[in-house]
Amino acid sequence: MACLVQVHQSLPGSLLRAWQNLGRSRPRRHHRHHQAALRHGRYGAFPGRRHRGQPLHLLPLPPACRAPARRGRPRLQSAARDFLAGWNQREALLWRMNDYGASPAILVVDFFCSVTVDVATELGIPAYCFFICCAETLAIFLYLPVLHAQSTASFRDMGAEIVRVPGIPSFPAMHCFKPLMDRHDVAYRAFLRVSPYLCRSQGIIVNTFRSLEPRPADAISVGLCTPPGLPTPPVYCIGPLIKAEEVGVKRSRECLAWLDTHPKASVVFLCFGSRSLFSANQTRELAIGLEASGKRFLWVVRSPRRDINDPVKKLDKLPEPDLDALLPEGFLERTKGTGLVVKSWAPQRDVLAQDAVGAFVTHCGWNSVLETVMAGMPMLAWPLYAEQRVNRVFLEKELGLAVAVEGYDKEVVQADEVASKMRWMMESDGGRVLRERTLAAMRLGKEALIPGGESVVTLTQLVESWMASP
């Protein structure tokens, strides 16, 4: 099996976690199959090295895949064609595959590499797409050509007009993914072209579990989200796939030791992902709200976003935040008994697993959602970018696992809203109901991953179909 991924995507790690789950349930057959993950981009890969002791090898793509094209983007389709067609002739790519005695029988690509599906099909290699977001988001991307044909207006101009997609809650057009807001934008046009590739794949592997998202999974499976004239691909829900280990030992110990000193379910954890940035004004307003709430909190603070036009510099690593400059004067001293502010990073999965944590303020990224569900933790939803606004609608309206922080779509969420929502979550009957629902979802997620569980069975059947193919 070969994997083709964008550098910022987590396909190799996610598939490895799925592989480990399968290995625990089917150890004898597990070791008969191997993977090669191929990545492109300036961060490169680790040629020929076994990934943490597992039979997953990260190999570099040929130079054509790394050559810059228009606007600095790789010419992925032609590069993929060269790469796949020449697999048996390219010694640079075969020097590890020779150990396995075979060219790739299966290609697994992530969402951003779905353009390669047709290339693989031409060469007789079955191609599958791995979708790292939820089934609800997948339904929208599959259905996008239908929505596009229904209107000539951009989502940004439709305002509160309701968007309807089979299998998911309806939502206002203004809450659609930011890259889709302008139908004339290059990003929108690129996403519009993705749906046919997904539909023509041999199947879509999704990092979710079916009992969490039965409606969108069923709607996709029966073809309700498939544009006219395209085949309906099988959907394989094999999650939840969650990172099994954290880095940053010193900060891990600091956070976890601090949590150990507080009562059960008494701390609100605030963390907004590795790419989310607030303005300095929003950071200050959030601090005021935390203090006014009177609740215990653990808050991960990052340096404020850079208001610059250079897209490359925006991606540069930010310095550690200057808490004295960012936070209200005296804030750290006044809250030192009830709050802990951590710079830049905290071991999110480990923090969520602590008994002292009672709620999570999250940006609604899907990986964070899965970690939160598997910790049985209710969510205060504060979406920031990408598909997170639609995730918020799904979490709140469909699953009942979250409540939104009002004003997240404005320039600044006010301090009184932060304080009010934190008190509601920690004190009200509504917060208690959310907690009960998330605990029920956690149990379903754990059941999906045990031998005989829905996700393990799905992955086992998928892999066995690969092994049985000629």
Image (cartoon, rainbow, N blue to C red):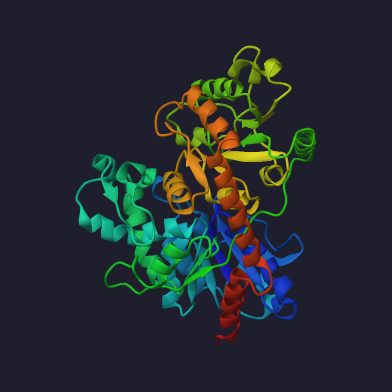
Quarter-of-image position of residue 289: top right
Quarter of the picture holding the N terminus: bottom right
Place of residue 51 in the rendered image (x, y in percent of width and height, measured from the top left): 71, 61
Give the vertical position of 263 relative to 399 (above or below): above
**Is any part of residue 78 visible from this angle?**
no
In the image: residue 60, left or right of residue 28: left
Give the image location of residue 50, x and y in percent. 73, 63
The answer to whether 58 appears left or right of 6 in the picture is right
42, 34: nearer the viewer: 34
Q: Residue at x 63, y 36 (%)?
A: 269
- Percent from the top left, x then y, of residue 42? 56, 48
When asked about the image quadrant of residue 61, the answer is bottom right
Judge whether 107 appears above or below 467 on screen: above
Q: Quadrant of the C terminus?
A: bottom right
Residue at x-position 67% and y-position 71%: 22
- Horizontally, residue 343 falls left or right of residue 82, namely right
* Residue 284 position in % (x across, y down): 55, 20
Residue drawn at 56 percent across, 34 percent down:
316
Outermost residue, left side: 152
| In the foreground, 193 or 335 | 335
Is residue 150 shown above or below 237?
above
User: Number of callouts in the render?
Assistant: 0
Q: Is residue 57 visible?
A: yes
Q: Nearer the viewer, residue 308 or 230?
A: 230
**Which residue sits furthest top?**
329
64 and 29: which is toward the camera: 29
